[in-house]
Amino acid sequence: MSQALKGKVALVAGASRGAGRGIAVELGAAGATVYCTGRTTRLQPSEMNRPETIEETAELANQAGGQGIAVQVDHLDPAQVKALVARIEDEQGGLDVLVNDIWGATKMEWNKTVWESSLDYGLRTLRLAVDTHAITSHFAIPLLIKKPGGW
C-alpha cells in the first residue's frame, strides 16, 4: 500500500475494536503514526470480557507499515484526554488526523422498553457515546488545527 500518510500523526480514540481498530490499521498501512486509545488493555480487560486490546491494535498498525502507539485513556475523563493530547504534542509536535470513534457500550438490553431498562446504564451509554466525543474534540482540535491540512 502507498505510504501517503508517512510523517503524519493520527489519534484514533476508541481503537480497541470494531471500526476504530480497522481505521487505525488502515492509517498505519498508509504510513501514519497512530495513537490507539481506549480503556481496554492486556492488563485491564473489557467490561464485556472481549479479548481485543489497544496494544493489539497498535501492533496491527505496526504490521501494516505504520507506527502504532497504544495509550490507555478513559475519554470520559478530561484530565486523561488533556494529558494524551499534551503527550502527542510533546512527542510528535502536532496532530494531522483525529478519528473520534468512541462507543463504549458494555451491554445492550434488547427486548426491553425504555422504562424497563436500567436508567443508570442508559445514561452511562449516552455519556460514553456523546460526552467522550465532546471531551476529545475539546482538547484535540486545537492541536489538530495548529498545522494546515489537519482532518
Image: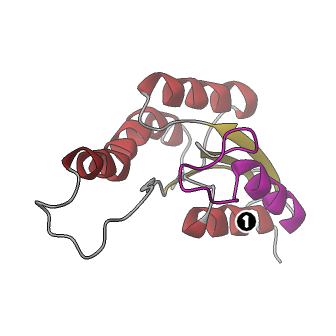
Closer-to-camera residue (102/47): 47
Instruction: Tell me where the magenta segment starts and ends, as one range.
Output: 41-64
Residue positioned 54% across, 56% down in the render: 48
For mark 1, what is the residue? 25
Q: Going by the image, does 51 lie left or right of 148?
A: right
Vertical comparison of 118 with 113: above or below: above
Residue positioned 58% across, 42% down in the render: 39
**Mark 1: which amino acid?**
Val
Closer-to-camera residue (111/65): 111
Q: Total label count?
A: 1
Picture coordinates of residue 1, whole percent (x, y): 83, 77
Residue positioned 42% across, 60% down in the render: 107
Vertical comparison of 37 with 22: above or below: above
Picture coordinates of residue 120, whole percent (x, y): 24, 44
Q: Residues within 10 Å of mark 1 (few under 14, many from 20)?
A: many
Mark 1 lies on a secondary structure that is helix
Closer-to-camera residue (38/93): 38
Q: Going by the image, does 63 lie left or right of 122?
A: right
Q: Going by the image, does 110 lie left or right of 82?
A: left
Vertical comparison of 27 with 12: above or below: below
Picture quadrant where residue 142 is located = top left
Q: Going by the image, does 79 lie left or right of 112?
A: right
Residue positioned 30% across, 73% down in the render: 110
| Magenta-colored stretch includes residue 47 | yes
| Magenta-colored stretch includes residue 107 | no
> Which residue ends up furthest to the left in the rendered image?
115
Picture coordinates of residue 8, whole percent (x, y): 71, 51
Q: Which colour style is shown?
A: secondary structure
Picture coordinates of residue 9, whole percent (x, y): 68, 47
